[in-house]
């Protein structure tokens, strides 16, 4: 009999446990997930008091009870102990929070806090940490080093050394050094156009003998080229001899008009021969022999190579026929093309070095004699004319060469080109100051080549600029400048 009550008690306890499980599951189903979460939080920490619930995506929206936000996310509870903890940290002068107390800093050099502000509304300031009243976000501290940086140009930021390491920040000194640049291009050898002779006759006639009879032949100045028979030349010689005899007979006549007429006739016939390119020596020979020559010889006016020939025996020629083209190749030109942006760096008289694959190891030196005034619309290049001496006639027209123009800029302030942030309308660099302060500074650049940029203004030699990690610093600088505008 005594055993029965014990069994009865065990059975009752089992029924009660099953009922509690059933009620718990029914309670979860009935009240929903949001309230169950809140109750669970309250059961795990019964001492924490919920001030309100807020939308995590829009913290300024507050609610008096848990549930769902309009965007579908669960409302987040804000407990009273969160604000109490921040206030306790601010009021406690322990070494761990002295740096976060306004007007105080640690001996180890930690950052000094001036005040706290709402990151969503920077105009709101507080002298202690806490929660922003409008959006419910945690207040952000304003440090003293940021305030000192504010005295510098807008966008100046301070970055701790450990953050600089994480961002991969590298710096370099601004230096002053001589800058020399080589413009390399190709060139083509051509004949000097100022030393080309085109040979014509000024009277119609017939070619009798040809002394220079192939293209490429080297002729000397005064060397005979061909003989010409011309009826006009023959009759003019006869007139000259008649005028000469008449001048001998009538030159001393008592009548002045007759004497002057004979002299004028002699002078005009002599001048006609000279205008037809009859040389003085040939006229002297005509004077001495008084014999009319059927054929008259024509001579080369320059020393050079025959590059074109249209003279053949027993052919008729007229004044418009180009009989020979003779080119003096003792000096030649080299036509080189450079890009239009390189034109400001070259000038007439500048020395140019040329090398040819035909003569390895040999360098030819010339000077720029002319810069063409137009740009090739297809290649966007400008042509340079380089004048070269051609001893031994090694340089032949139509040869190709490699040209190198050395541009000396003098001693300039130089920085690596990777240090420059190009915004299109302006270029900036970040100048490093003691204490991890980075100042954005506008610069005006000159030529940029070989990984270096010439600085015309904005920097001085001896300053330090950022060459790596400057994009991250620029992002921080832009954010700092925007927040400064919002604060003021």
Image (cartoon, grey):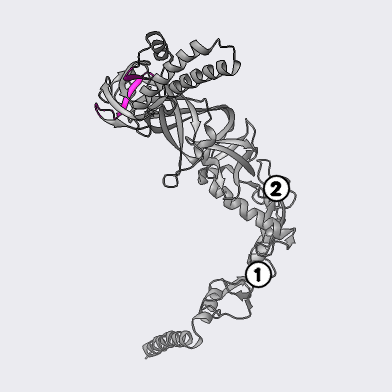
Query: Which quadrant does the C terminus fall into?
Result: bottom right
Contact, mark 1 vs mark 2 (Cβ under 8 Å): no
Query: Which quadrant does the N terminus fall into?
Result: bottom left
* Relative to 395, residue 122 above or below: below
| Residue in view at x 46 percent, y 21 percent | 269
* Relative to 476, residue 286 above or below: above
Specify the segment rendered in magenta. Answer: 293-314
Circle number at residue 112: 2
Disc 1 and disc 2: Cα gap in Å?
26 Å
The part of the image, by quadrant, that contains residue 210 is: top left
Count the labels in the image. Answer: 2
- Residue 241 colored magenta? no
In the image as oriented, which residue stretches furthest toward the top?
288
Q: Earlier in the sequence, mark 1 or mark 2?
A: 2
Residue 389 appearing in the image = no
* Relative to 448, residue 257 above or below: above
Q: In this view of the protein, which residue sits in the foreground, 396 or 419?
A: 396
Helix, strand, or loop for circle 2? Answer: loop
Tell whether 256 sits left or right of 107.
Answer: left
Residue count near mark 1 (Cα–Cα under 10 Å), binned few <14, some 14–19, many ≥20: some
Q: Where residue 264 appears, x then y in whole percent?
A: 53, 20
The part of the image, by quadrant, that contains residue 320 is: top left
Q: Where residue 456 appears, x then y in whole percent?
A: 62, 36
- Residue 308 colored magenta? yes
Q: Where residue 39 appears, x then y in whole percent?
A: 54, 78
The part of the image, by quadrant, that contains residue 54 is: bottom right
Tell whether 164 sits left or right of 145.
Answer: left
Circle number at residue 135: 1
Helix, strand, or loop for circle 1? Answer: loop
């Amino acid at each position: 009999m005594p055993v029965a009550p014990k069994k009865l008690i065990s059975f009752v306890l089992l029924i009660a446990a099953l009922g509690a499980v059933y009620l718990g599951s029914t309670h979860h189903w009935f009240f929903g997930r949001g309230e169950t979460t809140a109750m669970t939080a309250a059961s795990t920490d019964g001492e924490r008091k919920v001030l309100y619930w807020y939308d995590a995506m829009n913290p300024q929206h507050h609610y008096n009870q848990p549930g769902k936000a309009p965007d579908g996310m669960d409302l987040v509870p804000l407990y009273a102990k969160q604000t109490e903890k921040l206030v306790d940290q601010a009021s406690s002068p322990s070494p761990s929070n002295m740096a976060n107390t306004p007007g105080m800093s640690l001996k180890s050099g930690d950052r000094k806090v001036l005040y706290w502000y709402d990151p969503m509304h920077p105009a709101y300031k507080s002298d202690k940490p806490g929660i922003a009243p409008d959006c419910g976000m945690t207040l952000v501290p304003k440090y003293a080093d940021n305030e000192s940086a504010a005295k510098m140009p807008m966008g100046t930021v301070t970055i701790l050394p450990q953050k600089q390491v994480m961002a991969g920040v590298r710096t370099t000194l601004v230096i002053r050094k001589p800058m020399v640049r080589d413009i390399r291009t190709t060139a083509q050898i051509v004949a000097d156009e100022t030393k080309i002779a085109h040979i014509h006759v000024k009277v119609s006639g017939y070619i009798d003998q040809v002394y220079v009879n192939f293209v490429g032949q080297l002729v000397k100045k005064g060397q005979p080229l061909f003989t010409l028979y011309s009826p006009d030349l023959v009759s003019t010689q006869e007139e000259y001899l008649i005028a000469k005899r008449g001048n001998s007979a009538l030159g001393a006549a008592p009548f002045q008009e007759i004497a002057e007429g004979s002299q004028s006739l002699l002078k005009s016939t002599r001048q006609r021969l000279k205008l037809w390119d009859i040389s003085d020596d040939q006229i002297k020979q005509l004077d001495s022999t008084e014999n009319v020559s059927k054929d008259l010889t024509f001579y080369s006016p320059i020393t050079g190579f025959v590059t074109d020939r249209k003279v053949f025996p027993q052919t008729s020629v007229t004044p418009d026929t180009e009989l020979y083209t003779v080119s003096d190749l003792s000096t030649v030109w080299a036509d080189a093309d450079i890009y239009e942006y390189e034109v400001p760096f070259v000038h007439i008289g500048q020395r140019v070095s040329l090398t040819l694959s035909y003569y390895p190891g040999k360098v030819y030196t010339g000077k720029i004699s002319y810069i063409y005034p137009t740009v090739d619309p297809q290649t966007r290049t400008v042509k340079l004319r380089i004048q070269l001496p051609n001893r031994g006639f090694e340089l032949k027209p139509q040869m190709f060469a490699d040209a190198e123009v050395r541009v000396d800029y003098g001693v300039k302030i130089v920085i690596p080109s990777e240090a420059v942030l190009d915004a299109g309308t302006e270029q900036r660099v970040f100048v490093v100051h003691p204490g991890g302060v980075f100042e954005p500074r506008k610069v005006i650049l000159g030529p940029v080549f070989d990984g270096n940029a010439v600085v015309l203004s904005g920097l001085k030699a001896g300053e330090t600029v950022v060459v790596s990690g400057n994009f991250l610093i620029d992002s921080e600088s832009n954010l700092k400048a925007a927040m400064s505008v919002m604060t003021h």
